[in-house]
Image (tube, rainbow, N blue to C red):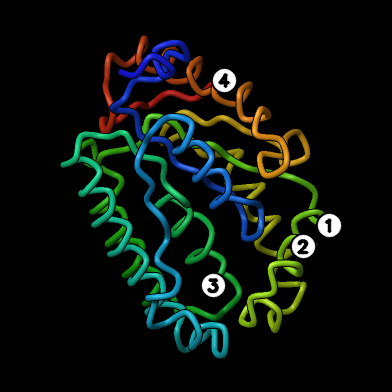
Amino acid sequence: MTNGNHRLNIPNDSVITIAGTVGVGKSTMTNALANALNFKTSFEKVDANPYLDKFYDDFERWSFHLQIYFLAERFKEQKKIFEYGGGFVQDRSIYEDTGIFAKMHYEKGTMSETDYQTYKSLFDSMVMTPYFPHPDLLIYLEGSFDHILDRIQKRGRPMEQQTPVDYWKEMYDRYQAWINDFNACPVMRINIADYDIINDQTSIEPILERIGHFIQHSRKYTGSGACHHPNFVE
């Protein structure tokens, strides 16, 4: 454990996952925390995804393919982190795939019931078991819908610009409902209006202190290190 991490009570084998809707700033937070803690990063491989552009053009045809691809990639990443021994910050969690995206497409009719049940059965068999390496902490980034939509528009990704605003609102509302019921690992909620780590690097300090508190509290009750199964929510 480095001196800085020791001061913050954040073990060097910790695994921290950043969750939240599109445009909320997960990648920025991932980089900031990894730099502050000298951790490795695990990013969603958007550019290499062979289904993403097709999906935005035709939700119904490609939603199942996209979700299976994400599940496989995130599972491989989680396995790599476990084998490495922790010390990672992840951009997006594996839990959002089933709790948000697959469920949303099924309920809106852009994924068939057969595809949804097949996906959910596979997800449960791979992830929702005591053998899956769950993170020490899930940091949930949240903010107002208008603030997040403004970020999406400023980012300017073509496939996001052509997506109707109603889709982003639907996703935003589902994220709010999902996090309120989530209990697979400890959760720390942060409002994006409360920090500005791009223009004020010192705003990361109180976040680091909270992370140390959450992880120490969790491990005290579970006795587990990174990549175990902390069934604790504060």
Q: Is residue 25 above or below residue 212?
A: below
Write down the residue under mark 2.
149
Q: Nearer the viewer, mark 4 or mark 3?
A: 4
Q: Is residue 158 above or below residue 90?
A: below
**Amino acid marked by disc 3:** His
Disc 2 vs disc 3: Cβ atoms closer than 8 Å?
A: no
In percent of width and height, residue 66 lies at 41, 75
Quote the CA–CA distance across marks 4 and 3: 35 Å
Residue 143, quarter of the rendered image:
top right
Quote the CA–CA distance across marks 1 and 2: 5 Å
Q: Residue furthest right?
A: 146
In percent of width and height, residue 141 lies at 63, 42
Disc 1 vs disc 2: Cβ atoms closer than 8 Å?
A: yes
The mark that comes first in sequence, 4 or 3, is: 3
Write down the residue under mark 3.
105
Label 3: element kind: helix
Write down the residue under mark 4.
210
Q: Nearer the viewer, mark 2 or mark 3?
A: 2
Label 1: element kind: helix
Write down the residue under mark 1.
146
Q: Is residue 83 above or below residue 110?
A: above
